[in-house]
Image (cartoon, rainbow, N blue to C red):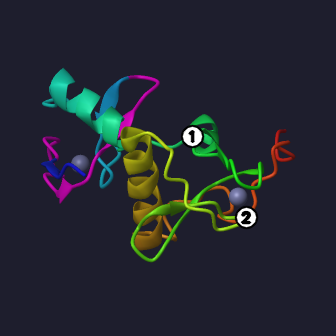
């Protein structure tokens, strides 16, 4: 994760900002404002490691179909930070490296900030989204 100093007046905090993929702006997680000094190179790096602001669509992007049990679910981390199926515990070692990395970062971030990142359940994520309003 990139740590950056917020360049907004009155903030100036050092934090891990998030890329808003809808606006392509990088947002300070302390003050919520856009940090303008981020290069497009850094933005694309943030995107590739999954350091992005999560919305409903992004959450669903981490739903993976397991080749062992054929269930689609949000993956979980094993003892060695490997990505496992949350249904049958099969090691999802066929995920592409960038995707596996993004999933891992996402899960680790959530473990660190369970209160601030509210996401779909780690348990079996039903394919049919019943929360659509
Ligand atoms: Zn800030
Ligand atoms: Zn499985």
Which residue was labeled with disc 1? 55
Q: Is residue 76 above or below residue 9?
A: below
**Left or right: where does residue 99 sit relative to residue 128?**
left
Note whether ligand 1 is within 8 Å of mark 1: no
Seen at 41% across and 64% down, the residue is 108
Image quadrant where one finds the C terminus: top right
Q: Quadrant of residue 76?
A: bottom right
Region in magenta:
6-23
Residue 35 in sight from this viewpoint = no
Q: Are marks 2 and 1 in contact (CB under 8 Å)?
A: no
Residue 110: where, in percent of width, then height?
47, 64
Q: Is residue 65 magenta?
A: no
Residue 118 in sight from this viewpoint = yes
Q: Is residue 2 above or below residue 115?
A: above
Which residue was labeled with disc 2? 87
Identify the secondary structure beneath mark 1: loop
């Amino acid at each position: 994760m990139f740590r950056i100093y917020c360049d907004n007046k009155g903030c100036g905090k050092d934090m891990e900002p998030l890329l808003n993929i809808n606006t392509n702006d990088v947002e300070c997680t302390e003050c919520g404002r856009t940090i303008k000094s981020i290069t497009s190179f850094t933005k694309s790096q943030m995107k590739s490691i999954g350091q992005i602001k999560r919305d409903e669509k992004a959450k669903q992007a981490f739903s993976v179909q397991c080749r062992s049990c054929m269930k689609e679910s949000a993956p979980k981390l094993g003892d060695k930070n490997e990505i496992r199926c949350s249904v049958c515990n099969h090691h999802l070692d066929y995920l592409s490296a960038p995707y596996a990395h993004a999933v891992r970062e996402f899960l680790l971030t959530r473990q660190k900030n369970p209160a601030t990142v509210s996401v779909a359940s780690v348990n079996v994520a039903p394919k049919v989204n019943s929360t659509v309003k």
